[in-house]
Image (cartoon, rainbow, N blue to C red):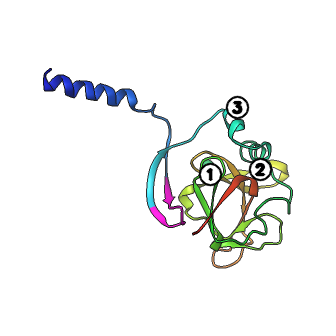
Amino acid sequence: MSSAWCALSLLLVAAWAAPAAGPEVTIVEFTERGERKGTVTVEKIIKTDAEWQKILTPEQFAVTRRGGTECAFSGAFWKHHEKGIFRCVCCDTALFRSDDKFDSGTGWPSFFQPVAKENLELRTDTSHGMIRTEVRCRRCDAHLGHVFEDGPRPTGLRYCINSAALKFVRSR
Ligand SMILES: [Zn+2]
């Protein structure tokens, strides 16, 4: 067999294995320990409701895929004080750190900044007769919560996030 034929068949295999090109996003990756690795361009994660329902609890689905809000003082993380990193419950993207968490008294986990602005998407939300800024996961569009301008120094921001949208990875 000629080497040209081998090269051609390798090319065909590569084309066959390549995933269908979808929308891409550039996010910042973090290690298990919460150390910043650098930016990476990845495909957006797009699933049907049925697919999300297979991997999420009903509450996680209602919050992240339907824009719901968990009851105050009910979630797993509003009074959670371990050291680590909070990731998207849907797609594992790193979102917040315990070092940036503060006690807002609202009953929802609150942070004064995200791990990386690139990992969030902010949208204007005019539901419920209010104008608010919605916070979503950049990679999978999960609804996380809202950001308000009444937070503590140094940013003055309060990212008010549903526990149901987060999974916690403890630093070792
Ligand atoms: Zn996500």
Vertical side of 156 occupied by 23: above or below: above
Residue at 14% in and 26% down = 3
Residue topped by disc 2: 126
> In the image, what residue occupies the spot 54% across and 42% down?
44
Viewer-side residue, 36 vs 150: 36
Q: How many marks?
A: 3
Q: Quadrant of the N terminus?
A: top left
Circle 1 packing at 10 Å, graded few (<14), some (14-19), many (20+), is: many
> As shown in the figure, which amino acid type bears the numbered disc 2?
Thr
Relative to 88, is 65 on the left or the right?
A: right
Mark 1 lies on a secondary structure that is: strand
Tell me the quadrant of the picture where the C terminus can be found: bottom right
Q: CA distance from mark 2 to mark 1?
A: 19 Å
Q: Find residue 102 and name its label.
A: none
Taking the view exactly as shown, the residue that stands out farthest to the top is 1
Q: Is mark 1 within 8 Å of ligand 1?
A: yes
- Of callouts 3 and 2, the N-terminal one: 3
Point out the stretch of residues depicted in magenta. 27-37
User: How far across and how far down the image is residue 114, in percent?
Assistant: 61, 64
How busy is the neighbourhood of tag 2: few (under 14 within 10 Å), some, or many (20 plus)?
few
3D distance between C-alphas at marks 3 and 2: 27 Å
Question: Would you name the residue on which mark 3 appears?
Answer: 50
Amino acid at circle 3: Ala
Q: Nearer the viewer, mark 3 or mark 2?
A: 3
Please report whichever mark, 2 or 1, sits nearer to the chain's N-terminal start. Answer: 2
Q: Is residue 90 left or right of residue 26?
A: right
- Which residue is located at x 66 percent, y 33 percent? 51
Q: Quadrant of residue 50?
A: top right
Q: Secondary structure at mark 2?
A: loop
Indicate whether 115 appears above or below 54: below
The one nearer the camera, 59 or 116, is 59
